[in-house]
Structure formats: structure tokens, C-alpha cells
Amino acid sequence: MKKIINRPILIVMIWIIIIIAFFIFSLSKELVPFSYNIFLLLIICFLCELMDSSLGMGYGTTLTPILLAVGYEPLQIVPTILLSEFLSGLSASIFHHRAGNVDFTSKNSRHRKIAVVLALGSVVGVIVGVNLAIEIPTFILKLTIGIIITTAGIIILIFLNHTFSYKKWKMVSIASIASFNKALSGGGYGPLLTSGQILSGIKGKASVAITSFSESFTCLAAVILFMIRGHYISIELLIPVCAGALLSVPISANIVSNLNETYLKRAIAILTIGLGLFTIIKTIF
């Protein structure tokens, strides 16, 4: 009797085949010039998004300085990262739901309500962040972002077994600050939003999935605003970035579903501190 492949594995296999086929098609049509650097970029984006979709943070914060180091301009990088995170974040939230890490579809889903509140709360931050990204130097602001992120991680470690009350106004405030960071620098959204949810009593697995969902719409709004201001996206950069990010999505959802909740919170706290310190060091030096 033939062994039948179970449906979740089949979906993951089809997903990966589609992404790889699209990437190969792009190379064959010379939408992306063939080079070893393109494959390296795809692998880096895969690893960054694997971390982001598994722990709710790290994609833009890590990828932005890497792309700057290899010679891309900030206003090339930020809109590209934002568009790729719209696609990968939306996909990640679907896979997280399928893996049971979060519930977005039940009639009175608390997770869906929180995600919608965070997405709406991000609108103001996105509008302000995009305009500042185009108009002003960001040294002091990036330094402040780094300090805020580091502090959030330390607070999670200190209050690991303590739960604060959930308040809608707190979530809207955090979402506005986080989306401001995201639109300005391409990163800084996940560390604040994921840690903020955990401190408000939302479980680690759900907070990662909710961050992916709300971040996707935040990124879409920012991309639209950048394009309105005349800053367009390089297809040559976008395709390998998106392909690498999207390949990691189903894998990360399954990683989260198998993680212990306490260990997940601790990992999120440590990574938040690390990314905050990285932001501070990168800004100063």
C-alpha cells in the first residue's frame, strides 16, 4: 500500500516548489541578473525571515545593515524590505494559523481583534515615519529606538512569569511607535510589538503570529506612501529578497508550534536585547 503524504507537508512542498520556480523564471527572463551574490542574498533573506517569523522580530533590523554594507542605498532598501515583509508577514500569519499557534477565524477570536487593533494603530506611525525617513537625519532617533528595544527585552526577562493587564490603548501606543520605527529604518517593529504583547499577557506563540499579521499591513501602507512620494522598488533587489523570505515561512510556523512557551518568551527577550544593542552599536559606530 502506498504511503500518502499528509496534507500539511504537501502544502509546504507545493509552496516551496512555487517560490523556487518563480525565482528560476526570473533568472531565465533576466529580471534578476545571474550571479553568486544573488543566491547569497536569497540565503541571507531566508535566514533573517526564518528568525523573524519564528520569534516575531529580526528581519528588517538585521537585513537593513547587511544591504547597506554591500552598497545599496537606504531608500532602495527600506521600501524593498517593507514590500517583502508585507508578503512574508501575511503568508506567515496564515501558516501560523494552520499550525495552531494562533486563531484568526473563530467568531469571537481575541487574536484577530488584537491584530486589527495593532494594524490600525500603526497607521499614524507609518505616515510620520515615511515622511521623516525622506526628510531628516536619523542618528538620534535610531539611538532612541535601540534603547527602547533593549529596555523592552530586559523588562521581559525581569517579568518573565508576571502578566500585566491588557489595555487597548497600550497596544495602540506600542503599534504606533513600532510602525514609526519600521517606516523610518526598515526594522524595529517586531521587537517592540512582540515584547509589548507578551508583557500584556498574550502568549508567545500567538504574539509572534499576531506581529506577522499586523506587520504585513503596516508594511503595505508604508510601501504605498513611499511610492506616492516617488520612491520606487528595484525588481532586481526585490525578487531574491522576497524569494528568500517566503521560502522560510512554512518552516518557521512549524518551529514555533513545537517550542515550549517559557523557552520561547526567554528567546524573544534575549533576541530583543541583542537587536536593541546591535541597533545602538550600529548607530554609534
Image: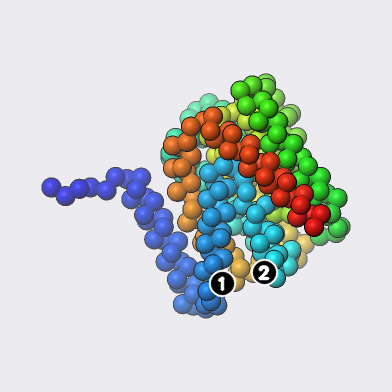
Residue at mark 2: 70
Q: Residues within 10 Å of mark 1 (few under 14, many from 20)?
A: few
Can residue 182 be seen? no
Q: Residue 40, percent across and down?
A: 54, 67
Q: Is residue 78 left or right of residue 110?
A: right
- In the displayed structure, 194 sits above or below 221; it is above
Q: Residue at x 50, y 28 (%)?
A: 107
Tags 1 and 2 touching, CB below 8 Å: yes
Residue at mark 1: 37
Q: Amino acid at mark 1?
A: Asn
Q: What element does badge 1 sit on? A: helix
- Quarter of the image for residue 57 reads top right
In the rendered image, the residue lying farthest to the left is 1
The numbered disc on residue 90 is none
Q: Amino acid at mark 2?
A: Val
Q: What element does badge 2 sit on? A: loop
